[in-house]
Image: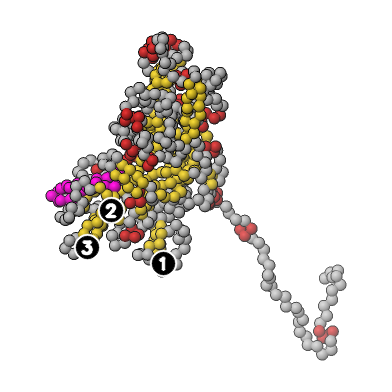
Amino acid sequence: MNNDNKISIVLPTERFQGAPELDSYVDISLQSKQKEIIEYDRNYNLFLNDVFDKERQESTNFNLSSKLSVIFQNTYTGKTNYTQFRNNLYYVNENYYQQLSFQPNYDGYWGGYPEFKEFDLTRNDYNVSGYTTFGTPHLLFPQNKADTLNWSFYISYPYQNNYTKILSNYNSYYTNWVVGDGIPFKTYYSQINGENLITFECFVKHGLSVGENVQLSVSYTNPSNNTVTNIFEVYFLGNETVGSEEYYFSIQNIGYLNGFLNADTIGTFKRVIDPDNLTETTSKYYIREHIILNDYENLVITPAGFERQIFSDNGKFFPAALTTNNLNKVAFKEGTTVYNLTNKFKIDINGIKDNQNRPLTELYYTIINKGSFGWFNEPVNQGNTSLKQGWEFNIDYENLSPYWRRNPNNSNSDTSITVSSYQKIDNGNTFTFYYNDNLNVGDFLDGAFCEWNDFEQKEREISEIYHKFVLNRNILIDDNATIASQINPKGYYYKPHYKFTLRVFSDYIETAPITENVVDIPDYAFYSQSEQEYRWRDLYPYGYIDSNNVGVDNPFTNNSHYVHDNFIFKILPEGSNIANNNINFINQPISDDCE
């Protein structure tokens, strides 16, 4: 054997005298505190679907966009001797005024409608000579400000509830009430299927079901035992006419004494789920107040390319001989416009709570009449506001409701939006023009009339809010104005708030007994003393749609949710035959195998 290292093996008996012939060795352990790292310990498999969903659920950024289709009916005319307005009318009786202008005592007045451009969401007349440019224009503005003159656009959300606001109704029957007292009613006696009933007429949807109870603003004292109650069970819905179930309900008439609930009794009621638990199951009623989250500088409106409504433009050519400035012109009484409205910057809703102290699930586009050119918004009598507000039940589609009166002013219908003015001198006369001031971030605006029930953890919108603006009758005079119309001039209604649904609550209620250790109870859960449990509705995750089609699945990219909706912006004159049409969207065309 070759032994290059000169290693010698010496037996014990050769090394030490008397040593036993035994093996000598060192016991080397095979155990180790180190181990080789295998591949799957060094790598982690990432599934793009999981990463996408995690980022989506954690994101609180939103981009809103909408398609706004304008529907407008031009109804009210007047006459004016202010040159710039006179040159920009859609003329009526132009032959009459043309002949009148030849008379030696001609006072300079000419009659017609304000053109559609004064109502449209944006303007395209930034270069009209004498009106918006050159010479002494009525109002000079650059093209990039065209979307800030007629209307102002904001983003808002429901912030708090107003339980003390005074509401009024003049339609069906008159009543004045504090919104926190509930929903008004008027009674009459009826008989259905041989059963004697006391029927309650409501001018808004009552939201009741048979078997539920109502707490009335009036109480009944039983003369036999002096017991007092104002809780009654709902026995029947409707008045046996189509669609009446939502506006009429009845209780059994068991022969109440002492004139209780005689015909034409007016009062208010609150919905009660469980009469043995009034504190927790009685509904609350309020005006939902919005707060401005982003002002007009974070929104941009642009015409929708290659899109029109089904309605045709109402335009007319007027030859130079029949115009006030002897120029040919085409004027539009009404138009069909479609716009895209979107925010410039992402909206972060992290930490924002809604009016029920829950995570925010709704944002709104809020659109307010501005009227910078001064055709509208004459202030109310002895006030510094012009825009009026009311709810859908305040609009009488055939007649003019006293609710909107301006002189003497019904302050219950005033908005909080102030009005400003400027003056122009024309032919030696001074003319005053009015416009509504811009809102600021943090300002409040009234919203819908709503109902909330703690036990159900659910909000119901009872009636939407509307604004009303009127013509500036100091500039555009109505020769046919009656005393009534001078006190309460006719005008145009529009709805200011348009909802985007960011996320939805489940249509079922989660419960957690206090005796059990339940995790992930949200901080907005309602604790029921009577049931000794927490009650809440879960927030559905983004992208989840349940069997009842409840949920949202909006696009998500670049750490932001993109929410889109289509709205119809209706500017409706009083008495319009389209005012009571509640359609708020245009249906997509039906496609079948024939296409």
Mark-to-mark CA distance, 3 and 2: 16 Å
Circle 1 residue: 514
- Magenta-tinted stretch: 184-207
The count of marks equals 3
Residue 200 highlighted magenta (yes or no): yes
Secondary structure under badge 2? Answer: strand
Q: Amino acid at mark 2?
A: Ser
Name the residue carrying label 2: 217
- Tell me the quarter of the image containing the N terminus: bottom right
Q: Nearer the viewer, mark 1 or mark 2?
A: 2
Q: Position of residue 478 (x, y in %)?
A: 37, 24
Residue sitting at x 42%, y 36%: 382
Ranked by sequence position, the earlier of labels 1 and 2 is: 2
**Residue 410 in view (yes/no):** yes
Identify the element where label 3 is drawn. loop
Q: Nearer the viewer, mark 1 or mark 3?
A: 3
